[in-house]
Image: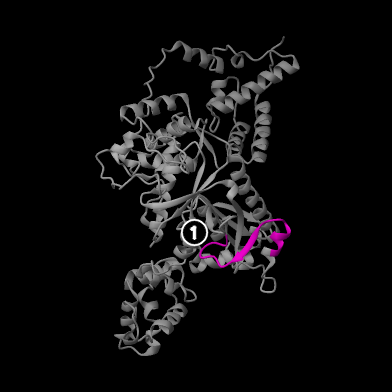
Amino acid sequence: MEPYSDELNPLFVKWLEEAAIVATKKGTKAAILYNKALDKVKNYPSDITTPKQLRSIQFVGDKTVALLTNKLRRFCEENGFSVPEPFAPHSSDGSVGQEKRSSDDQPASRKRAKRAYIPRRRSGGYAILIGLYIGCKNRNRAGLRKQEIIDLAAPYCEKSFSSNPANNEFYSAWTAIKVLESNDLVASSGRAPRLYSLTEEGEELARKLKQADNLTSSPTQNVADFSFDNEIRVSPENSRNGASSPLGLICPSSPTRQLKPYHDTANKQLDGVRYDIWEKEEFEIILIIDSREVRSKEDRGFFQNRLKSLSVNCESRALSVGDAVWVAQNKRTGREVVLNHICERKRLDDLVFSIRDGRFQEQKNRLKQAAMKHYYYLVEEGGISDLPKLNDGSDAVKTAIATTMTNSNFYLKRFKSVDDTLSFFVTTTEAIKNHFEASNTKLVVLKPEQVSSHREYANVLTIFRTEFENRRSPYECVHIFSTFQEIMSKSGMRSVKELFLLMLMAIRGVSLERALTIQTHFQCPRNLIEYYKNSTASPEEKKHHLFNLFKNEVGNKKVGKVVSERIYEVWGDCDLTESSVT
């Protein structure tokens, strides 16, 4: 075959134009580079005869040379020409083949061996490996979900698995999962919630870590596998140790709280708290809708009536927290327990307003105090594009949705209408029923004599979950519904700071940021009242005191003139002699 003897410049210009068009359609940054290279090649003063000459042109790199070389070879093959010698596969004049050959002739540089990753003891990575290893072995499963791993790994980690942005703790122990995945120790699959499993290397490392630290069992593995509702037994080893916490088996030197009996087999007591066992045949599932949750003022019974028509066992009551919960009602005694599912429903407009006035974060915090396993956050919307009607709250809503899913670990679902919300209630109720039916899950009903705080409410649940829910036989630990209602309704447990913030945010225009700024300066309500009381200025001047005080603050922390006047109207005329404000 005759070699192609015409000028190559026009061909290179044509192919660069094609590459630029393709890259532009794809929206890649390569389009900019191709256009720059095209301009330089088009204006090149002499004929291009070698790859080396082509590479010397500005904006033409190795990848572009390889692209044009392959195009030229294909062109010659299709048109019956032989490839010009400099662009031939085995050319010695700066071609790709020559580069490859010359690189092969060079002695291979000695690569530094990659150092094996071994997580520090009681770090997040360490705890996740141990938790996954123990969980998969004990439950005979290939992988575990995030919350299952956290429940098992938490006792082995000195850091919390929950972030706390309020204290500038933006990263939790769970972030170590990314390091484990990047080092091929943990693999994940599926969509959220993802399923995590140990690779062969990860399983081997976890086994060695477990042996090295003498973790002969999981925190509760030494306890015999017993039936909790029928003659509870305790293994002799645990009876001697008397450990009341999983930490007792991990860190013998750490202080542990001693129990009187670890289990009272006659009276069914754990950690001094009595409990009952309900078989799945003994109870039925009921959906409780908050009585204040209405479709409109004219249609207050919509949810209850509509759900009953869809064969959902539903009742309407005033809930202390949340808009919907699921309870199990004993068929014989009528006693009710709250299951580990709670739901908050928001219309889009209400969501925007709650973000502005600070209710959004407060409501999420109250939901978390319920110590549930499953949190559902439902947003009814007409689409994000409708937000301009609400004074451009689009960005705020998107941020709120993102933080609710990531930081708060809520299951968030956006619906177009209230009918979609009803469908969610129906399917979720059915799923909960099927869960108890299929898994033969029994309820461990907690009956503490006294619960005085949210923390104590959650701690009792944690103790029971650690003991019961890591067994082969499925159990779910629950509080009595009346206990849930009583504890979640208690506002007297709030600190003065929290109450002061709530008082301030009750004033129109006072956002959470402004309230925090005011509270940080005055500390408590009394100081704010005395600030106005001790001022010798006229009432009109006092109205602008806070405006002048915080005028140098940044962004939403500033207090405007109107808001300053409203705060004075509420707090400026307070009389300390008639108030118990501290």
Figure quadrant of the C terminus? bottom left
Query: Which element carries disc 1, helix, strand or loop?
Result: helix
Residue at the extreme bottom: 538
- Residue interval drawn in magenta: 305-324
Q: Position of residue 120 (x, y in %)?
A: 32, 34
Total marks placed = 1
Looking at numbered disc 1 in the image, what kind of residue is underneath it? Leu
The answer to whether residue 80 is left or right of residue 99 is right
The answer to whether residue 484 is left or right of residue 302 is left
Q: Position of residue 411 (x, y in %)?
A: 56, 51
Residue at the extreme right: 79
Q: Residues within 10 Å of mark 1 (few under 14, many from 20)?
A: many
Q: Position of residue 8 (x, y in %)?
A: 66, 23
Residue 164 visible in the picture = no
Residue 498 position (above or below residue 193): below
Say which residue appears at 35% left-offset and 70% top-offset. 496
